[in-house]
Image (cartoon, coloured by chain):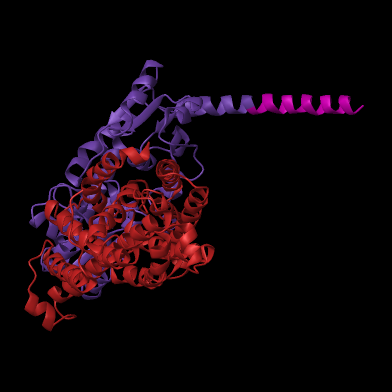
Chain colours: A red, B purple
Amino acid sequence: MKATRVLPDRALLPLLLAALLVCFVIALQQGPVALDWRQALTEPRASIHGVILWQVRLPRELLAIAVGITLGLSGAALQGLLRNPLAGPDLVGVTNCAALGAVLTLYFGLAGLAWFALPLGGMVGALVAVLLVFALAGKQAGVLTLILAGMAINAIVSSLIALALNYSPNPFAMSEIVYWLLGSIANRSSADLLAALPFMLAGWLTLLSCGRFLDALSLGEQTAQSLGFAGHRMRWRAVIGVALCVGAAVAVSGNIGFIGLVVPHLLRPWVGYEPRRLLWSSALGGAVLLLAADIAVQRLSPTNELKLGVITALIGGPFFLHLIYRNRNALT
Amino acid sequence: MIAAFADGVADMGLRVGYIVVALLALAAVDAAAVATAAQPRRIASLNLCTDQLLLMLVPRSRIVSVTDWAVRPESSYMAKAARGLPLNRGLAEGVLPLDPDLIIAGQFNDAAMLALLRRLGYRVEVVSVPRNLNEARAYILHFGELVGEPEAARALVRDMDERLARIARRVRDLPAPLAAVYAPNGVTVGRDTVLDDILTHAGFRNLAAEQGVVGYGQFSLEQLLAAQPQWLVLDVTADDAAGDSIAHRYLEHPALQALVRRAQVVVMPPRLSECVGPMTVAAIEMLVARR
C-alpha cells in the first residue's frame, strides 16, 4: 500500500471545506438557463433569475450537500461499527429498505398526511434494515457474510419496490422505479429539503457522538468494554443515527449508491486510520463527491438528466472491485 | 319433500329460462330487421379512443364491449354513455365470450393478440387513431364506414367543423398570447399534437412549438420560467384519485407555483386531451371561454 501523509484535522477539514465550496459554486452555475447573477442576487423574488437561483438551484444543491454528508458519514460509521471495510449503507441494504418505506408512503396516499410522513416512511424502512444487518453481524459474521446478506436483502427489497409501484394507481409510478433505485435530486424543492433536514441533522449528531466509541472499538470489542463503553447502548445509538439520516435522505433523493463505500476509503489514510476523525472528514467528503456527481449529470445530459446513481456507480463499482481484489486474501 | 320442492323450483327456473331465451331471440330478429346487412351488430372496441368514437356513432344496442378506461370520467369524454356496458382490459380474453362480429383496435394495440384473433376467425379492424385535428376528419369518416354508420360520421364531422368555424371567427381579432403546456415530469407538447391544435385554434401561440419541439418534449423548470409564458395549460394526465407520484409532485414545485401566480392557468382534463375528435373541439371551446 502506498504511504499517505497523515494530515491533522486543522489542515484536512479546511481543505475539504474549500473543495465543498468550489463544487457548490460550480454546481449553482449548472442549468439550462445562463444565470444573471446580479439580477438573481438583487431581486431574489421579483426576477425570474432570482426564482431560478433561490428556488430551483439552491434547494437542489443544498440537498446534494445534505444527502452527501449523510451517505459519507453513515458509510464511515457502518464500516467502523461492523469492522467491515466493504460496508456501506447501500451495500448492506439500508438505502433500498429506506426507499421501500418511502415508496409505500408516497404512492399509497400517506405522504400527504403530515409534512414528515415521507421521511418517516424512509426512516422506518432504514431502521428495519439496520436492525437486520446488526442482527447478522452480531453473530460474528465475516466480511463476506455481511456483503452476501446485503446482496440478498437488496434483491428482495428492490423486487418489493417494483411490486409496490406496480400496484400503485398512479400511471407514472412504474417508470419512477428508476428514480428510487438510482436516485436523483433534479427538481427537488425547498419543501423536500426542509422536510428531511431536521431528521438528517439529528442523525448526523447522533453518529458524530459515537466517534470515541468507534476509536475504542477499533482496538477490539473487549478493549472497548474495558475502556468503559457500554457496547450495547452505543450500538443502539449508531443504529438510530443511521436510520434517521439515511431514511430521511433516501426519502427525498432515492438510492444513490457507493458514496458511503468510496469516501471513507479514500480518506482513511489521511486521518491516520482513526475512526472518529474519519466521521468528520467522510461527512464533508461525501458532500463533495455528491456535488461533483450532480455537476456531472447536469453537464452530461442537460435536458433529460441522468440519474445520480449512474455516475456514482460508475465511480464506485470499479472501486468496489478494487477493494475486493485487494482484500481477496482476507475474504477467503 | 324438500328435494321434490327443489326440483319444482329448478323446473320453474328452467321454464322461465326458456321464455327469456325466446324473448331474446325475438329481440335479436327485431334488431336484425332494423340493421342493414352491412352493419356489424356486435361491435367490441379495445382502445379508449375507438371506444369513445364508437359510442358517438353507434347505438348502444350494437356495442358488446368497450375498455375499462371508457367508463372513467377523468379519462373518457363518453364515460356516462359507456356506463353499464361489458368492459374489457384491451385484451382478447375480455371480448371472446361476447362473440363479437367486429373487433376494433388502435394502431398501438398488441399486434400479436390481434393476429391471434384473426386466426380464430374474428373480423379485426385496426384503425389509425389520429394525433391531431387534420387526421381526425378522415379517421371519423373511415370509422363510420367500418361500423356501418357513414351518415352519422359525416354529421359528426360537419358539426365539428361548424363549431371550429364559430371559434375561428371569435378569436380572429383577439391578440395571440404565449402559452405553454406543462405535464408531470416537465413534459411539454410541441407541433403535430392535439394539444398544439387546441392551443392554436383557441388563438394562442404554443411556446414549445415556437422553440422547435415536435411531438412531446421536455422543458426543464428553468427553461419554462425563463420563457415566461402568459398562459400555462397544465396537462395533469391523471386526477387526484390516481394518488401521488414524483412526477405529480413536480407540479407543486415552489418555483412553478411562482409562475402559476403570474400566469393564467388552465387545467386540461385528460378526457378532453387524450383522444382527438369532438372532445378536442370541447377543449378549444373551454379555453376560448376562459379568455
Residue A146, given in percent of the width and then of the height, sits at: 43, 45
- In the image, taking residue A32 as reference, residue A111 lies left or right, namely right
Q: Position of residue B77 (x, y in %)?
A: 37, 50
A200 shown above or below B192: below
Give x and y (percent) for residue B95.
Answer: 46, 29
**Hey, which quadrant is residue A194 in on the image?**
bottom left
Given the current orientation, which residue lies at the most extreme right position?
Answer: B1
Residue A217 versus residue B232: which sits nearer the camera? Answer: A217
Q: Quadrant of residue B17?
A: top right
Which segment is the magenta one?
Answer: B1-20
Relative to the observer, which residue lies in front, B201 or A43?
A43
How many marks do you count on the picture? 0
Q: Is residue A48 above or below residue B247?
A: below
Considering depth in this image, is A176 or B228 the residue closer to the camera? A176
- Residue A50, above or below B268: below
Q: Nearer the viewer, residue A210 or B109?
A: A210
